[in-house]
Image (cartoon, rainbow, N blue to C red):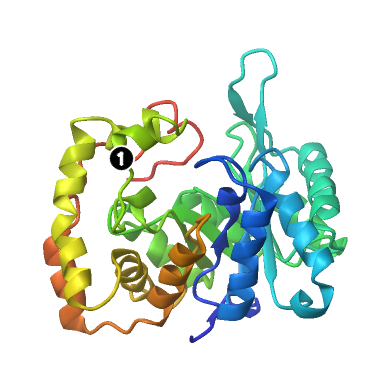
Amino acid sequence: MKLRKLGKFGPDISPIGVGAMSFSNFYGTTTETQSHRILYAALEQGISHIDTANVYGMGVSEAAIGNFLTQNKASAAGKFTLATKAGIRRDSETGNNFFDNSAKHLTEELDKSLQRLKVETIDLFYVHRRDANRSIEEVTQTLAGFIKAGKIRSFGFSEIAPSSLKKASEIHHVAAVQSEYSLSVRSPELGLVQATKHLGTALIAFSPLGRSLLTDRPHTTQKIATMGFLKSNPRFIEPNLSANIEATAKFRALAAEMGTSAAALSIAWLLHQSGHIIAIPGTRSVPHFLEHCAGARLNLSKEDIAQIESILPVGWAHGDRYSQQQWIGPERYC
């Protein structure tokens, strides 16, 4: 598969990466053995980017990756670029999340991530959510200091607005911005796709499969009931869930007609939007992971793109992408 730049100054990496939130129990019970199976498959498929965070299982995801790299030094050395994140904290009394972009917190969490990942330098370190009480210019200076200290090679931000990216870029180049982007979430096209491309910043698209809606196996009501995040997400609450599954049925049929899976077609559509976009789907299943890889190799014509977008036009999804509580943190810009 054709490689893409991780920002204009970054290394060449695969057009899709491993979204390692699935290495924790966020979407269902998993084990380190299952996570390692995905990483072995990534090595075999030439997938070279792994995306995790300190809060994915409160260190579980990072530790699983670190253990894999230690156990497979000969075969995995130099094969992956590693991205992790910090900036989300949890109030021990209320259980609610809050955001901390202070130099003290980011430094402490970066050091813990380095230990869990068992590396001396992290390739890409994100601020997971903006701290509204601290200027992005100040936070950018902190992140630039980590580069000077040799702890990270580059940095990025997750779920920020184009205006914030421009402010940060005036202080130091931002290698990547992470945002939800898929056939079901088109809002990045209203400024973020353009701003990242102009600034030479990679746009890292998480949840490129619409949290299962854009696959051949959308989550059922029974499955969603066991998933803390989705059971309160508007798109997965009835009657929206049934409406969304019905709306995507023709897309699944189109994928079958084209001789591929809906997941592969979803990823292929996304990667065809711009050469600076990198998708990071997550899964606990090797067969599903291979579908993702097939999408990264799938070539689509302009006619294919038009047909896909006639079936799933902008705004087709029923329900907001986040609940009111889930919207706390991401920057809205449109």
**Residue at x 50%, y 56% (from the top left corner):** 283
**Residue at x 62%, y 55% (from the top left corner):** 34
Q: Residue 62's spot in the image, x, y percent? A: 72, 51
Quadrant position of residue 100: top right
Choose between 101 and 51: the one closer to the eye.
51
Q: Amino acid at mark 1?
A: Thr
Quadrant of the image for the C terminus?
A: top left
Choose between 75 and 203: the one closer to the eye.
75
In the image: residue 11, left or right of residue 15: right
Quadrant position of residue 173: bottom right
Is residue 311 visible from the viewing direction of this image?
Answer: yes
| Residue annotated with mark 1 | 220
In the image: residue 165, left or right of residue 126: left
Quadrant position of residue 12: bottom right
Q: Residue 302's spot in the image, x, y percent? A: 20, 82
**Residue at x 27%, y 82% (from the top left corner):** 300
In the image: residue 82, left or right of residue 297: right
Residue extending furthest top? 93
**Residue at x 76%, y 79% (from the top left corner):** 75
**Eyeballing the image, is 186 above or below 24?**
below
Q: Secondary structure at mark 1?
A: loop
